[in-house]
Amino acid sequence: MKNLYINNHFFFALFGVGIAYVLAFFFAFLMVVAHGLLIVLFLLFMIDFLLLFNQKNAVQAQRILPEKLSNGDQNSIKIDLKINYPFTITTKIIDEIPFQFQKRDFLILRTIQPKKNILFEYILEPKQRGEYRFGSLNIFANSPLNLVSRRFTFQKDALLPSYPSFIHLRKYELMALQNEFLLGGIKKIRKLGHTIEFEQIKEYVPGDDVRTINWKATGKRNQLMVNQFQDEKSQRIFMIIDKGRTMQMPFNGLSLLDYSINATLALSHIILKKSDRAGMMTFSKTAENKVAADNKSGQLKKISQALYNIQTNFFESDFSRLYQEVKFTVGQRSLILLFTNFETLDAVNRQMKYLRGIAKNHLLVIIFFKNTELQHLIQKKPGNMQEIYDQIIAEKFEYEKKLIIQELKKYGIHTVYTLPENLNIEVINTYLEIKARGIL
């Protein structure tokens, strides 16, 4: 009986019978009508009960989950529902989704024909990494009488991990391999030149760069021949993530730390597809989550596991410790992409000697973030004096960021200054441009 639920329709009908009994005190002939209505209601209740409960496996359902959730992306959750009742039923589907989503009103209502098998789908978008626990999948079935409901419960517990964003890795890979990486559909990476790794001499075809004509081979063959180059391979690329308190700032539900982690996984995938060696580490008070640069088949999985449960510790990041770690663990010249967030020029100057020390032996690219709210404030047309003041302050902060870029550039340190939502595309573009220039 614990799966029996009485619907509102029954109570409305019972309320109507009660009114008939009240009226019977004033009009005696209505007493027979009231008794008759009560008997009919009782009989309909029993018929509805028997219709729903006389079959053991009347409803079968299964929640179909992915192997893992992709953090910050839309993940599809499916429910496979099979109805064995010989009549049309109305179902109410209540899935007990993880508390992290704070969705207290999850409900799917459907009218389903007899003997049907239907697949439902809904979307979940996690905003933090970690474990997500699903509760029971509850199906409430109503017959056409709709006086009572029968509850069916399936899959009482399911645990699903949420990993850094991986859903769009294939899309990034195709764009990168074609050298046609787009930013918002409008920005195409600039192919600046060739790397120094020679591949072969081939016959000239229309469209080949005339600057690559090999005149000696042309003279021997008496036809135009060109040198063909390929991207230099097995270069070391390190991604370093600052997990200090400045990286906890949230934008669109994700922290800067989460954006950096998602970008690191996406870039690692492209690096390995380009046959380079991908490695990573995080730092704050100490260097942690270290993965040595390699290009073996299981490298992306290693990086994904290292990124899975990284959390900020809210400390002030120690760049002197980072400098020591890079000096002793990254021996060969490498491309180092440092995800951090500087808000003022003074903050950069305090760490400049350590950044210059790293840039002395490696190609250092510092990636920091535009403040989305400040960008909106700058672009907004002010309507009063207070908004004018706010806009001036926002422009001052934006000017400070530009000074940071100029100061870093003065010491040969490359920068990527981007909106958080464009981070993946910007860092991959930067990597591909560096590869195209052959400056590593």
Image (cartoon, rainbow, N blue to C red):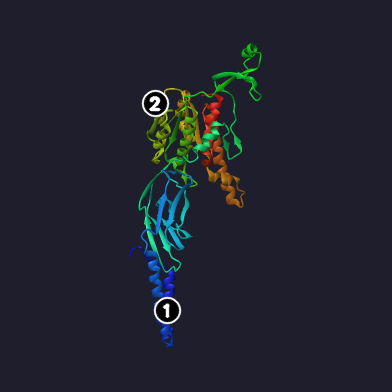
Residue that mark 2 sits on: 329
Residue 403 vs 381, above or below: the answer is above
Q: Position of residue 93 (x, y in %)?
A: 43, 58
387 or 15: nearer the viewer: 15
Residue 338, label in figure: none
The foreground one among 63 and 397 is: 63
In terms of image quadrants, where is residue 426?
top right
| Residue 263: percent from left, percent from top | 48, 37
Query: Would you say residue 3 is visible in this rendering?
Result: yes
Hey, what amino acid is under mark 1?
Leu
Tell me which corner region of the image, top left, top right, bottom left or bottom right, holds residue 136: bottom left
Q: Which residue is found at the position 47% from the left and 53% from the top?
A: 120
| First in residue order: circle 2 vs circle 1 | 1
Q: Which of the 4 image quadrants contains residue 89?
A: bottom left
Q: Secondary structure at mark 1?
A: helix
Q: Position of residue 191 (x, y in %)?
A: 59, 28
The residue tagged 1 is 37
Looking at this view, name the residue that lies furthest to the top: 220
Residue at image point 47% right, 27% down:
276
Label 2: few (<14), some (14–19) or many (≥20) C-alpha neighbours in 10 Å: few
Q: Residues within 10 Å of mark 1 (few under 14, many from 20)?
A: some
